[in-house]
Image: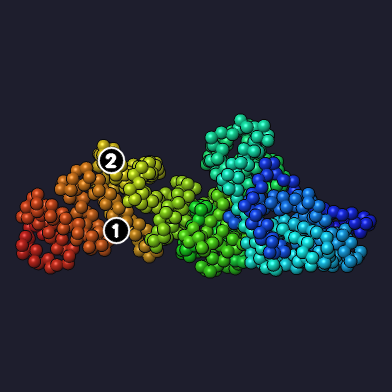
Amino acid sequence: MDHLTITQAVSQGPVQWPLHLGSVPALASAFQQRLDVRNAIDQAAAGHTAVVLTQVLSGGGGVGKTQLASAYAHQAVAEGVDLVVWVDASETDQVIARYAVAAHIVDAPNALAGQTGEKDARAFLQWLATTKRSWLVILDDITDPDTMQPWWPPSSAWGCGRVVATTRRQDAALSGGGRAVVDVDTYSAHEADTYLRARLRSARAEHLLDAQTEPLAEALGYLPLALSHAAAYMINEDVPCTDYLHRFNSSAANLDDLLPRHADTEGYGRHVAAALLLSLDVAQTCEPVGLAIPALRLAAVLDPAGHPRDLWRVEAVINYLTAHRVPIPSPHSPAPVSSTQAKAALRLLHRYGLLTDDAQAGFRAVKLHALTARAVREHTPSGEQREIVRTAAEALTELWHKGVEKAVLHTNVDSLDGFAGDLLWEVEGHHLLRWVGRSLTARGLATAAVPYWQRVSDTSERVLGRTDRKTVMARRELAVAYLNAGRSKDAFAVFQEDYAYEAEALADASLQARQAPDSKRDFHRRQSTEGLLALLEDTLAVRERILGPTDPTTLSCRIKLSIAYWEAGQQPQAVSMLKLVLKHQNEELGVHHPDSMATALRLDHVRGERKERWWKRSAGSWRRS
């Protein structure tokens, strides 16, 4: 407020009660009462002088905090509360200015013409503390809890005053001074569905309701702001829920088109994506400076339902944050980001309501709203996406080796795959897809494993080619999935089609495992070796199921696998494999058959026994081996 407004307040004459100061937002069409949340607010207010509404599932806004505060303001007006003050608290200067004007309007004793706004504001706070008149002050959208500390309305000496505040911040300062914090989540599934139906009916657009109304609400994450914009879009364009859901799920669509600014018919005042990311620029300038944006971009490609905190200690993540920190604190080469700073970046995003960091949630400690994640991805420069995908893939790989709960890793891999597409293959991250698929197979989920491996093998063939060993490996997995699903004919068809490519693929895998360079390539060498072992294991599984355990082709594959085990340092597995081969050969061919004796020599060599012992028994067989 400027000085002219204060002058007008001074000259307005005797106070006319009740007073309503500030512009209270109108309630949205089909406003949901949200009785559970309002009961929580009422209970908090019973023992506290102020109630602060924040969000339980952080997403930058849009959960309906302002609408709930507005409902309390309208209720206070209807009940005849003497003074209702609505304050835009996004800037502390605005709060002070509003208080200063209010001091003159209510004729506060210490409000004097010509003195500073801060003195008038303090006079208003003193009046609130001592007046016997009933009052309600709404502080909407507090963005800086620290600077707000001196300007919180005080406790009423007569118990007739109340404060309701809204904020997207998660800050300890909000709960001090007798204030209670109430978390406001998105709509429940029932509330979201009820809102959509009521909103469309109120616009005489019932024909847009169909069987996909509930799935649409779920796809929008039950976010009130998004539901409002989506409903307006459907009404304006005469698009039913099914068609809108199809457009929303299309990879080519973006939030700016699906939830456009002109769809803000309820007067929220913000585009959805802008509302979700409103705090990001501010967070980027806070300590640790320059990490908020890269950290949020990385989190946005993972599962919105949550990923482990440990991911932010992984070396690949630390290196990514170091490389993408903007602005760089030092004009010279950037200092490495520490794991402590990475954790601080998470807490920073948490405080600004951009994601939730909750240690009590275990392996799903870090989560963010799905629409926030989508908004972040859509605003990520295409040139940075490859490095983000690579970082996420390497981080999830390390967590997989550390034994993090597989169900959590599965959903995070699925989210990464959904965003990355072919990029995941280009950065050598598709081994994660194989791990997820093999996990499905191991758990006996054949119904899910078959279509999963069909998709993976088709993608591998398209991206890498039909003869690539990774494609052959994926098709081996598909054959195993077919067998587990009782589809032996389909498995045999895959086996027949791939037989011609098998030797070439195995040779290529073996060569890569042997020739992978040292130094900083340990990870890739390990992946090559694991790829060879996996391909041999899968090939053996298919041959045993289709050709039988004693078929020469099966035994030949088992010998190759034993050699691969031995070269990978897995001696017990190599010994076990060769023992089984020798058993079958002795039974089928006899102990003196050249093949049996060659296998016996290999087994002796793997065990580390003296070669001379077997050389004396069969020099010819040793040369043959």
The circle on residue 228 is none
Of residues 254 and 144, the one nearer the viewer is 144
- Which residue does the image show at 70% across and 68% down from the upper left? 177
> Which amino acid, by three-letter code, is at mark 2?
Gly
Q: Position of residue 178 (x, y in %)?
A: 69, 67
Which quadrant holds residue 500?
top left
The structure residue drawn at horizontal position 26% and vertical position 52%, both measured from the top left corner, is 537
- The quarter in which the C terminus is drawn is bottom left
The front one of 17 and 443 is 17
Mark 1 neighbour class, 10 Å CA radius: few under 14, some 14 to 19, many 20 or more: few
Q: Which residue is mark 2?
A: 486
Helix, strand or loop status at disc 2? loop
Q: Residues within 10 Å of mark 2 (few under 14, many from 20)?
A: few
Q: Earlier in the sequence, mark 2 or mark 1?
A: 2
Q: Is residue 611 above or below residue 493?
A: below
Q: Nearer the viewer, mark 2 or mark 1?
A: 2
Question: Relative to residue 236, is residue 401 drawn left or right?
Answer: left
Residue 449 % position (x, y): 36, 45
Q: Amino acid at mark 1?
A: Arg
267 relative to 324, above or below: above
What is the number of the mark on residue 514?
A: 1
Image label count: 2
- Is residue 472 something one can see in this rendering? no
Q: Do we see residue 518 in this rendering?
A: yes
